[in-house]
Amino acid sequence: MDSTADRSLSDRRIFQLSAFFAAIYFVQGIAEPGAGIAGQPIFFLLKDVLRLSAAQAATFLAIVSVAWNIKPLYGLLSDFFPLFGYRRKSYLLLMTGLAASGWFLLGSQPTYAYGPTLAILIACGLGLAFSDVLCDAVMVETGKPLGMTGRFQAIQWGAINTASVLAGIGGGWLSAHVSYQRTFLLVSVFPLISLVATGLCLREARSRYNWEMVRETAGAVHSAIGSRPLWVAAAFIFLWNFSPSFGVPLEYHLVDNLGFSKIFLGTLDSLGSAAAILGAAVFGKICRRIPLRRLLNLSVAIGVASTFAYWGLVGHWSAIALTLGNGAISMVASLATYDLAARSCPDRAEGTFFAALMSIANIGTAGSALVGGRLYEWLGLRPLILVSGLATAACWLIVPLIRIDEPPPSRTSAEG
């Protein structure tokens, strides 16, 4: 009887955690400035209202993404300094409130100028980036003992891509039919979902700031900084995310050279996200059955092939085929790298180091956007595809250096 009760409690706890992870990532998929439902409206706001060139738009979005590139600071803050008795929960409530307030303020602007728009979007990004760090810290803390970091991340990314399906179609329609102000006011509602999910689903033991806790956390941080496996994982993650052909260059190519409409761009985004949901589901099934090193090698092969396939981008149907194929297989590949990041994090400093590895991923993405935005105007898209493919292929050189400790089988995976 006690065993049945314990098992029921464990199942309920896993369900609550899964719901929490899904909610936080769903909101991120809707409300993130660069890729959410306001992503298309912001793109055309920069292009048509602020009259920014591809290089200028890439610079603007790179500045907005700074909030995502300093994520280790948020991890350090929550790892070392509990807020109102909690390391994660109180910060989550505060940061989701900041994101909602930022979008509401942006929607209240009568007109748009470069400086105020940039400042408000940075605040929105800060709220969402900090929330992302806290969510991931909970994922690592709870997932590693259960051997479920892969499955939890599959749930997270399934949720964010579900949001992206809505964001793609919805963002394209909103950019064509609804004012920027009303779009941003709509987005401001979604962070409230994170507030509710945090309050209902996140169970966290109270924690106080004390010197012993600081010493333990500082020791974990110091040990991890000198960890060769962590730096090797960081190098892999950076190269994986350095793809200067994607993002702004691809968007400008689709609009200016292929003449795609706003609605069709939104449809492509949604198709890619729908395919990524399938990829996340596949990864959730195979992540405990195939060794991670083999998955990483397969991921590099997938990444190289899917990148070079964009040389065949010539019109609407090729764009649909590439979006569907790349969306599914790249999601499997990306989740393998995220699982590597989660397994590389030391205890007691999960928030700091998972955030650090994800910041390296974001730096790779932002750096490739800056490089791509400038080189696109000189070279066009095709040479950038070559650079992206070679950067991904370089990951093969790093895989043999990665130390991977496979987790023990969990009850959930054994039964599944």
Image (cartoon, helix red, strand yellow):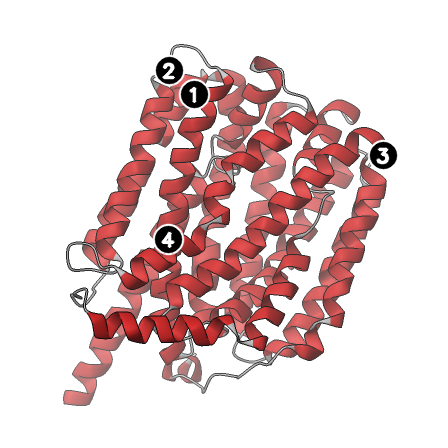
Disc 4 marks which amino acid? Tyr
Q: Are marks 2 and 1 in contact (CB under 8 Å)?
A: yes
Mark 3 Cα within 10 Å, few/some/many (few <14, many 20+)? few
The kind of residue on which mark 1 rests is Pro
Residue position marked by numbered label 1 in the rendering: 116
**Is 224 above or below relative to 266?**
below
In the rendered view, tell whether residue 172 sits above or below residue 26.
above
Q: Secondary structure under badge 4? A: helix
The residue nearer to you, when weighing 139 against 10, is 139
| x 80%, y 39%: residue | 313
Instruction: Identify the residue position indicated by label 3 in the image.
Output: 379
Q: Earlier in the sequence, mark 2 or mark 3?
A: 2
Mark 4 and mark 3: Cα distance apart in space: 38 Å
Disc 2, SS: loop
Q: Amino acid at mark 3?
A: Leu
- Residue picked out by circle 4: 74
Q: Quadrant of residue 89?
A: bottom left
Cα distance in 3D space between marks 1 and 4: 24 Å
The residue positioned 37% from the left and 15% from the top of the image is 109
